[in-house]
Structure formats: structure tokens, C-alpha cells
Image: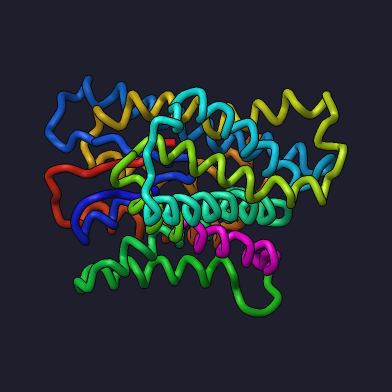
Amino acid sequence: MLVAGGREDAHYSAHLRPYQDGFIFMNSSPRSLAGILFPVGLLLIAMLSIQSGASLAKSLFPLIGAQGTTALRLIFASVIMVLLLRPWRARLDRATLRSVIIYGMALGGMNLLFYMSVRTVPLGIAVALEFTGPLAVALLASRRLVDFIWIALAVTGLLMLIPLGHTNAAIDLRGAAYALGAGVCWALYILYGQKAGAEHGVQTAALGVVIAALFIAPVGIVHAGSALLDPAIIPVAIGVAVLSTALPYSLEMIALTRLPARTFGTLMSIEPAIAALSGLIFLSEMLTNTQWLAILAIIVASVGATLTMRRETAVAIPAD
């Protein structure tokens, strides 16, 4: 998730998902209602797809662990991305290659830490905690007074999600730490992805996924061993890769060029809520009222950061 442009463009990065790796340009000009509803529908389906993929991934945890699941997802996703984007066409200099390597390692770490988190933390809470990484990049890029309001809201949401002491709303602190670590990797993904994609766009997207797979595969192999080759789990792993990468990528390639920039950013802000609903429907994860309010606070902070950002004429939106 990253954007290219001026300093204030970083606000958009708070609303771009981990499976978005390349660049396409989002149209920020006014559109008709019908022209907006179609890409909005596609974007909502893409968000549902990525969270459904995360829910499906959890079914593999008892068999190959979060580590093995991450490895298989990235391996199959890298195959899909290479076939789609043909990264061998990119010609990278030393500086760009360094950025691509860090970018890919950040992507791999983000996926691994997120899956480690959702072993013990409800999906919606994990996404909300992870969301603070790109939101921090977006807000810290500005020094305007209004942004401190969104920072305060995000911090309030964090404190509500990770309450001190023993309360009914308490969550597993190790799982929360994994989710926050995924957020840090997400922030690095933004910063180095912007550098990596500035010249080669979608080709560096595929290279990043390949590097992520190479980086995480040894972890998965050490943890799960030969269980990764079990024919019974391969179709599920491919399903996770498709739901988390191929399908959302295809939908967003269509949608992102047709949505006004602020509409896109605002819509992406509701992803923690979609994750919470996916956890409720697919995983029977019940959240307390306090946890729902905390997720709402982070969503409002993200929406606020989008709606109060300075206007830019062209914004490069990453796609994976």
C-alpha cells in the first residue's frame, strides 16, 4: 500500500491493502452515480474476498500452523502474480533492487505476523490493530492541527482494544503484539514500495511477492515440514491465494481507475468492520461493545484522515 506524489499523498496509504503491490492511477474527477456504484460494488467484493481468504486461512492453522499457511499462500500468490504481471520485463538498478528486497521482506513479514495474530485475536481486532501502521504513515506525514484529532481517535481505539489490567474486553497481548508488528511491516511496505514501484510499477509488485515467498518459505518449511505437501490442503491453500490475491487484484484493477480518490479512501476505511463481520459470520468470533467502539474509533480516524487531506491531481494507487 503506497502512493506516489507529494508529501501529503501519504494519507492515501492508510487505505490500501496488503495485497496491493503495483501502481495504477486513480481517477479523482467527478463521476455519475451509476459510474461510481459499479466500481464501489467491485471494491466491496474485493474487501470481502480478502477477509474471506483470511477466514479460510485459519482453517489451515491446526494442520500446518500460521507459518505454513503463510508460506503456501505466498508461494501460490507469487506464481499467480508472475503469470499476471511478467516481472522479468523489469530492469532494476542497484538502488531499486534494494528497495524491492526490503519491500518484499516487509510484505512477507506483514503476512506472517498477521496470521500469527489471528491465531488468538479476533479477525476484526487484528485488522484494526494492523491498520494503525499505514494510518501512522499517513498522519505523521502531516503537521496540521486537524490530524492530531485523528491521531487521538486512533490512540483511543488502541487503548480500548488493549485495555490495561484484567477486564472482560482484554485480548491476548501476544496476538495483539503480532498484529501491531504486522502494522509496522505494513508501514515499511508503504515506504519502500513507493520507492520500488516508482519506475517499474506492477512488475515490482510481482517481484515483491516472489521475495516475500522466498523469505517466508523457510519459516513455513521448518515449522510444518512435509505436511505442506499434503494433497488435502493444497486446494485450500490455493483458495486462500486466490481470495487474498488474484480475485481482489482483478476486481481492483477494474475498480480503482473508476473511483474518485476520496471515495476509495473512505471505502477502504471500513475494512476493519468488514473483517469483524467476516470473523463473526465465518469464525463465530463475538466482539464486545467496547471492541466494536474501538474499531469504530479507528475507522473514523481513517475516514477523517482521508476527507481532510489536501487535494492532489493524480494519485498512484498500488495494486497487487
Give the colour scheme of this rendering: rainbow
What residue do we see at 52% from left, 55% from top?
Answer: 106
What residue do we see at 49% from left, 49% from top?
Answer: 272
Q: Relative to 301, does residue 43 appear above or below in the rendering?
A: above
Image quadrant in which you'd find residue 182:
bottom right
Q: Position of residue 132 (x, y in %)?
A: 45, 61
Image quadrant in which you'd find residue 77:
top right
Whether residue 107 appears in this view of the structure is: yes
Secondary structure mostly taken by the magenta-highlighted segment of the chain: helix
What residue do we see at 43% from left, 24% from top?
Answer: 250
| Numbered disc total | 0
Image quadrant in which you'd find residue 51:
top right
- Residue 169 counted in the magenta span: yes
- Residue 88 counted in the magenta span: no
Residue placed most toward the observer, 7 or 209: 209
Q: Position of residue 116 (x, y in %)?
A: 69, 54
Q: Quadrant of the C terminus?
A: top left
Q: Which residues are magenta?
A: 168-186
Whether residue 15 appears in this view of the structure is: no
**Left or right of 266, for residue 109:** right
Q: Relative to 298, does residue 249 appear above or below in the rendering?
A: above
Q: Position of residue 41 (x, y in %)?
A: 37, 25
Q: Position of residue 43 (x, y in %)?
A: 39, 31
What residue do we see at 30% from left, 40% from top?
Answer: 264
Q: Relative to 287, does residue 246 appear above or below in the rendering?
A: above
Residue placed most toward the observer, 259 or 275: 259
